[in-house]
Image (cartoon, rainbow, N blue to C red):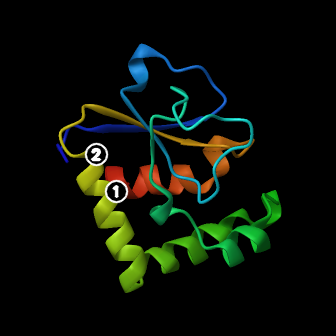
Amino acid sequence: MSPTTRFQVARVYDEPRPEDGERILVDRLWPRGFRRDDPRVGRWYKDAAPSGELRNWFHHQPERHDEFVARYQDELQTPQGAAALDGLRELVRGNKTVTLVTAARDASGSHAAVLADLLAGR
């Protein structure tokens, strides 16, 4: 991964833009209604997504966001989570811009934003 790699987040339903760079779907579940070759997805890397248990607990309730972020970061500190994060870092190596995409309605409040911050060193 280049130190100049820029990370951003978007919804998978958004049309790809030239400034998106590499698009990587980081959801554990494949989005409904999408073919496997849909250009809005790019690559699929589900290993860095939150566990099903954490995803179901959060259920995109804004009042749980801070606790979700803390729990998700804890998951990424486990051996399995660290390996998934390392795999994602390897996948984006050499890209100038990477857009992590998710099916969540609020991409900026999703796990994709947490991943983008971690990968960017924020």
What is the x, y in percent for residue 104? Answer: 70, 46
Instruction: Please tell me which residue is depicted at 50% across the width and 59% down the height of the picture.
Output: 46
Marks 1 and 2 sit apart, C-alpha to C-alpha, by 6 Å
The kind of secondary structure element at disc 1 is: helix
Identify the residue at the far bottom of this view. 79
Vertical position of residue 93 compared to residue 71: above or below:
above
Instruction: Classify residue 60 as left or right of residue 109.
Output: right
Q: Residues within 10 Å of mark 2 (few under 14, many from 20)?
A: many
**Please, what is the three-letter code of the amino acid marked with disc 2?**
Val
Question: Looking at numbered disc 1 in the image, what kind of residue is underneath it?
Answer: Leu
Please tell me whether residue 50 is drawn above or below residue 35 in the rendered image.
Answer: below
67 vs 8, nearest the viewer: 8
Residue for badge 2: 92
**Do residues under tags 1 and 2 come within 8 Å of each other at their CB atoms?**
yes
**Number of other residues with Cα within 10 Å of mark 1, as a class: few under 14, some 14 to 19, many 20 or more:** many
- Quadrant of the image for the C terminus? bottom left
Relative to residue 86, is residue 111 depicted above or below? above
Residue 108's image quarter? top right
Classify mark 2: helix, strand or loop.
Answer: helix
Q: Residue at x 70, y 68 (%)?
A: 55
Residue at 51% of width from left, 57% of height from top? 114
Q: Residue at x 54, y 62 (%)?
A: 49
Residue 48 in the image, given as x and y percentages of width and height: 46, 63
**Which of the 4 quarters of the picture holds residue 67?**
bottom right
Which is more toward the observer, 53 or 7? 53
Which quarter of the figure has residue 29? Answer: bottom right
Residue 66, horizontal then vertical, whole percent: 67, 67
Near-viewer residue (38 or 119): 38
Q: How many marks?
A: 2
Apparent side of residue 14 relative to residue 41 in the rendered image (left or right): right
**Coordinates of residue 118 in the picture (x, y in percent):** 39, 58
Numbered label attached to residue 88: 1
